[in-house]
Image: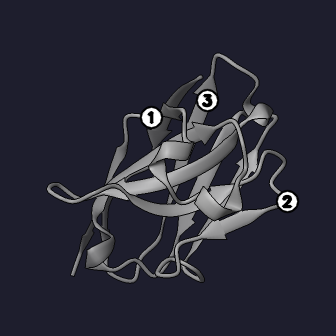
């Protein structure tokens, strides 16, 4: 499956952005979807994940309550709504697809089989 993330940009602290990740090539509903972020020089960090039909979601503790992951299987797209952004949220955000939902390891990059190229989010203070 091919993944294309979009929606990044420059936003002031306290602002909001919605990221999108469009999938193509395979049946989108067959995949668990996740969002990760990465700052240069640091490891890729888990943000959120959503099950195949969207009935289960899982968030990093630091994003819970500010970020919301959702999906529209008819549009083969997963979203990340980010509110109350802070400068430390600045990163390249990547979407990823996994064949299985395993909650114990859904935050690990090793679960995911396909990755998008990322979209840059910059939060100014």
Instruction: Say whether disc 3 or disc 2 marks the residue closer to the N-terminus.
Output: 3
Given residues 90 and 38, the one toward you in this image is 38
Asked which secondary structure carries label 3, the reply is strand
Q: x and y percent of residue 78 in the render?
A: 64, 46
Badge 3 is on which residue? 23
Asked which secondary structure carries label 2, the reply is loop
Q: Is 101 situated left or right of 66 in this image?
A: right
Q: x and y percent of residue 41 in the render?
A: 14, 56
Given residues 47 and 66, the one toward you in this image is 47
54 over 90 or under it: above or below: above
Q: x and y percent of residue 121 in the render?
A: 32, 58
> Crowding near pointer 3: few (<14 within 10 Å), some, many (20+)?
many
Asked which secondary structure carries label 1, the reply is loop
Q: Quadrant of residue 123?
A: bottom left
Give me the residue at 48% from left, 44% from top.
110
> Crowding near pointer 1: few (<14 within 10 Å), some, many (20+)?
many
Which part of the image, by quadrant, shows the C terminus?
bottom left
* Disc number for residue 55: 2
Q: Are marks 2 and 1 in contact (CB under 8 Å)?
A: no
94 over 83 or under it: above or below: above
Q: Is 84 situated left or right of 70 in this image?
A: left
Given residues 84 and 39, the one toward you in this image is 39
Label 3 or label 2, whichever lies nearer to me, is 2
Q: CA distance from mark 3 to mark 1?
A: 9 Å
Give me the residue at 57% from left, 62% from top.
48
Give me the residue at 47% from left, 39% from top.
5
> Crowding near pointer 2: few (<14 within 10 Å), some, many (20+)?
few
Q: Is 110 situated left or right of 104 in this image?
A: left
Q: CA distance from mark 3 to mark 2?
A: 19 Å
């Amino acid at each position: 499956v091919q993944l294309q993330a979009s929606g990044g940009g420059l936003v002031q602290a306290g602002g909001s952005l919605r990221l999108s990740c469009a999938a193509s090539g395979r049946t989108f509903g067959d995949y668990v979807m996740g969002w990760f972020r990465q700052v240069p020089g640091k490891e890729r960090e888990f943000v959120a994940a959503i099950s195949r039909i969207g009935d289960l979601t899982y968030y990093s503790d630091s994003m819970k309550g500010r970020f919301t992951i959702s999906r529209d299987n008819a549009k083969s797209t997963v979203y990340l709504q980010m509110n109350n952004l802070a400068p430390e949220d600045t990163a390249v955000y990547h979407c990823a697809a996994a064949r299985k939902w395993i909650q114990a390891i859904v935050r690990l990059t090793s679960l995911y089989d396909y990755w998008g190229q990322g979209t840059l989010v910059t939060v100014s203070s």
